[in-house]
Image (cartoon, helix red, strand yellow):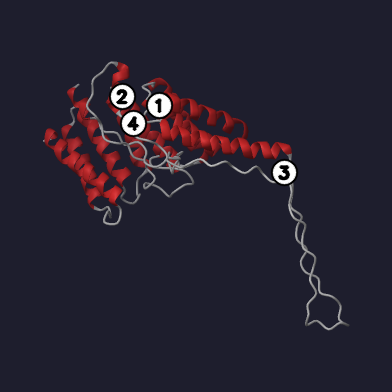
């Protein structure tokens, strides 16, 4: 369908890097126009520790996060600590009075070998995630390897939240690498984890990314199912760039099905949300919003 050429992504913003549809199309032998940078849904819901955007970066699973953090050597957990200082006498206290006792300082607890190993391995996993985000644009396959290493660590030492974010990152890297089946598998796992944790951000990111994955599979009907579920999760959220881009993506999915009236309605809603965003003190946000407005104003003409 010619309408599929209007696909515009809205993935993650913080902990997740953008996905270029033409790279995915090339892997499938399909020629597609360049799509706009995906964004994270971190503005849709209350922020979480890492990352995102309808995401990662963190994210989500994203926080993920920053993405260009330099890596410095991590100090190993110390096994030696200084002993508590001796109580000092009060110079104004009469000599005959009973000495005052200062609060006893708690002795520092030494980490066991197992606890030190856990700390080191979790720190390694954070490094794997950060490296993956740094290289995903040029080397998505390498990013998949880094995220898989992080996932292996989290399976042994991490929390369910960390596991969900790692699956989210793997889904995006697989999508970027053109491995759509793997992207679907990992993102569905992230969705299931978010539902178990009742984590609205993780749920919304996964639903949005599943919509984008199915648009890349040239299946707008299933893409709309996931996009509209993501929109329902975001109901009542304050205006954000991520929400505007979700409305834009829904419009293009409707357009791919030949439903022009619905496409126009959602593009108009995207413009309405963009107009409410405060961009005066945020040049990067202003640039992204301006790009969205220009894109929507150009494409809305095709549906009228």
Can you say whether 218 is above or below 90 in the image?
Answer: above
Label 2 secondary element: helix
Residue bearing mark 4: 19
- Marked residue nearer the N-terminal end (3 or 2): 2
Give me the C-alpha separation between circle 4 and circle 2.
Answer: 8 Å
In the displayed orientation, state which residue is furthest to the right: 96
Label 2: few (<14), some or many (≥20) within 10 Å?
some
- Marked residue nearer the N-terminal end (1 or 4): 4
Give me the C-alpha separation between circle 1 and circle 2.
Answer: 10 Å
Hey, which quadrant is residue 125 in on the image? top right
Hey, which quadrant is residue 118 in on the image? top right
* Residue 219 disc label: none
Label 4 secondary element: loop
Label 1: few (<14), some or many (≥20) within 10 Å?
many
Give me the C-alpha separation between circle 4 and circle 3.
Answer: 42 Å
Could you say where residue 87 lies in the image, as x and y percent from the top left? 79, 68
Q: Relative to the observer, which residue lies in front, 26 or 95?
A: 95
Q: Depth-wise, is mark 1 or mark 4 nearer the camera?
A: 1
Marks 3,2: beta carbons within 8 A: no
Marks 1,4: beta carbons within 8 A: no
Marks 4,2: beta carbons within 8 A: yes
Give me the C-alpha separation between circle 3 and circle 2.
Answer: 47 Å
Marks 1,2: beta carbons within 8 A: yes
Q: Residue at x 44, y 49 (%)?
A: 47
Residue bearing mark 2: 23
Label 4: few (<14), some or many (≥20) within 10 Å?
many
Label 3: few (<14), some or many (≥20) within 10 Å?
few
* Residue 140 disc label: 1
Q: Relative to the observer, which residue lies in front, 183 or 140?
A: 140
- Horizontal side, residue 96 vs residue 25: left or right: right
* Residue 111 disc label: 3
Q: Residue at x 35, y 41 (%)?
A: 232
């Amino acid at each position: 369908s010619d309408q599929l050429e209007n696909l515009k992504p809205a993935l993650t913003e913080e902990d997740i890097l953008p996905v270029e549809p033409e790279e995915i199309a090339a892997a499938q032998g399909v020629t597609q126009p360049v799509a706009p940078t995906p964004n994270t849904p971190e503005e849709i819901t209350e922020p979480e520790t890492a990352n995102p955007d309808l995401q990662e970066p963190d994210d989500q699973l994203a926080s993920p996060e920053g993405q260009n953090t330099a890596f410095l050597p991590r100090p190993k957990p110390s096994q030696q600590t200084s002993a508590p200082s001796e109580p000092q006498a009060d110079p104004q206290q009469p000599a005959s009075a009973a000495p005052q006792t200062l609060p006893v300082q708690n002795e520092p607890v030494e980490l066991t070998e197992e606890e030190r190993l856990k700390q080191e391995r979790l720190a390694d996993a954070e490094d794997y995630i950060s490296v993956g985000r740094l290289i995903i644009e040029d080397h998505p396959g390498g990013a998949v390897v880094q995220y898989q290493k992080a996932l292996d660590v989290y399976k042994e030492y991490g929390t369910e939240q960390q596991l969900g974010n790692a699956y989210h990152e793997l889904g995006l890297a697989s999508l970027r690498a053109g491995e759509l089946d793997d992207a679907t598998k990992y993102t569905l796992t992230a969705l299931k984890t978010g539902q178990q944790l009742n984590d609205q951000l993780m749920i919304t990111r996964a639903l949005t990314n599943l919509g984008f994955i199915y648009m890349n599979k040239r299946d707008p009907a299933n893409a709309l199912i996931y996009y509209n579920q993501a929109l329902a999760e975001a109901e009542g959220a304050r205006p954000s760039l991520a929400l505007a881009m979700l409305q834009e993506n829904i419009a293009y999915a409707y357009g791919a099905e030949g439903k022009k009236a619905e496409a126009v309605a959602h593009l108009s809603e995207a413009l309405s949300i963009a107009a409410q965003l405060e961009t005066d003190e945020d040049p990067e946000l202003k640039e992204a919003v301006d790009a969205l407005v220009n894109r929507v104003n150009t494409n809305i003409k095709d549906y009228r």
